[in-house]
Image: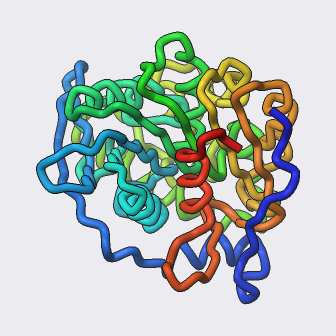
């Protein structure tokens, strides 16, 4: 598809750079009018996932469900997830915001946790949701890490994606994990990196306590970036040889050309997490199904607009794309 040449996104005048557009929504946005019903489901490998449902009608499934996948170290309670869930409900659809293993407020049982290329759990959630309601259509949305998982799922499993999955919209996606992990380690972006590492280290301590002798946390505080952390923990815990092997096989950019579901990718040019390699212009230009929109502004998982209804551009754009007669 042709690249979307002109984005309509305009930030509020007082959020005049990518850092403000990233930080302000993350720290100060509230979305109070969302009510979840939590369901814990057992996975085939003896673990569990916590699913947060927000249905339009109590006790009755709508005909359309949108599954929302959160970002790294996020969960269903984050403002960007709740904002999307509210927009989905207002459009008349049920929403399912799922929490990755270790992200729902309780540590998962197994040594493995989640990672940015883990499509098996998303596939499990999709198929479980189809059996939990009478849904005629399923849409997928995802932010950052969740966007990467969504794109990889659609491309890697293109011939196995259920027919009910009809469209997807993802935002702020690190489609090249190695370059993104290096980019966030730059001095101007370390405030974000340090925040992630703080929670990731805490989870490793919990794992070590839960599974004595299986997790070596010696010198944990000396791990200063994602490459070091992923080489030490993420890769070996999930069957990869190294951080580089993990990044290579988990980056969604290599799968985009195989996507066969109309899919929107919105990555802001001033996103502090995304280097040039995370703007898959060639892949989108050569695809019949993938639309790439690259607004000049927006930050990372930001896109605030300052409108009276409290909606963000990511939410309006997702609903617009998911419901359009002809995707664009």
Splitting the image into 4 quarters, where does residue 185 fall? bottom right
Q: Residue at x 72, y 30 (%)?
A: 253
Q: How far from the left and from the top, in percent, is residue 248?
A: 69, 24
Residue 44 to residue 34: above or below = above
Residue 17 to residue 255: above or below = below
Q: Residue at x 40, y 42 (%)?
A: 67
Splitting the image into 4 quarters, where does residue 41 fall? top left
How many dots with numbers?
A: 0
Q: How far from the left and from the top, in percent, is residue 214?
A: 32, 29
Q: How far from the left and from the top, in percent, is residue 139?
A: 46, 39
Q: How far from the left and from the top, in percent, is residue 226?
A: 62, 45
For the N terminus, the quadrant is: top right
The residue closer to the viewer here, 171 or 91, is: 91
Question: Residue lying farthest left?
Answer: 59
Q: Residue at x 22, y 30 (%)?
A: 47
Residue 154 to residue 233: above or below = above
For the C terminus, the quadrant is: top right
The residue closer to the viewer here, 133 or 26, is: 133
Question: Residue lying farthest bottom?
Answer: 14
Question: Residue lying farthest front?
Answer: 325
């Amino acid at each position: 598809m042709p690249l979307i040449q002109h984005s309509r996104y305009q930030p509020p005048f007082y959020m005049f750079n990518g850092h403000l557009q990233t930080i302000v929504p993350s720290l100060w946005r509230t979305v109070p009018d969302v009510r979840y019903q939590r369901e814990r489901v057992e996975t085939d490998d003896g673990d569990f996932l916590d699913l947060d449902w927000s249905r339009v009608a109590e006790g009755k499934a709508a005909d359309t469900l949108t599954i929302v996948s959160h970002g790294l170290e996020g969960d269903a309670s984050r403002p960007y997830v709740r904002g999307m869930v509210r927009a989905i409900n207002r459009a008349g659809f049920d929403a399912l915001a799922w929490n990755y293993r270790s992200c729902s407020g309780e540590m998962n049982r197994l040594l493995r946790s989640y990672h940015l290329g883990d499509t098996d759990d998303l596939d499990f959630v999709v198929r479980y949701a189809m059996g939990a309601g009478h849904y005629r259509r399923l849409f997928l949305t995802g932010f950052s890490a969740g966007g990467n998982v969504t794109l990889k799922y659609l491309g890697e499993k293109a011939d196995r994606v259920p027919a009910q999955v009809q469209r997807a919209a993802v935002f702020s996606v690190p489609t090249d994990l190695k370059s993104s992990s290096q980019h966030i380690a730059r001095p101007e972006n370390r405030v974000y990196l340090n925040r992630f590492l703080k929670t990731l280290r805490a989870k490793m301590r919990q794992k070590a306590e839960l599974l004595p002798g299986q997790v070596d946390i010696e010198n944990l505080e000396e791990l200063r970036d994602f490459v070091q952390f992923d080489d030490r923990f993420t890769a070996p815990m999930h069957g990869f040889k190294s951080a580089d092997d993990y990044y290579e096989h988990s980056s969604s950019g290599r799968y985009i050309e195989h996507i066969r579901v109309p899919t929107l990718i919105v990555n802001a040019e001033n996103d502090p997490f995304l280097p040039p390699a995370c703007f898959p212009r060639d892949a989108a230009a050569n695809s019949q199904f993938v639309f790439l929109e690259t607004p000049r502004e927006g930050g990372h998982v930001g896109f605030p607009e300052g409108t009276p209804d409290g909606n963000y551009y990511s939410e309006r754009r997702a609903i617009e794309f998911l419901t359009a007669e002809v995707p664009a």
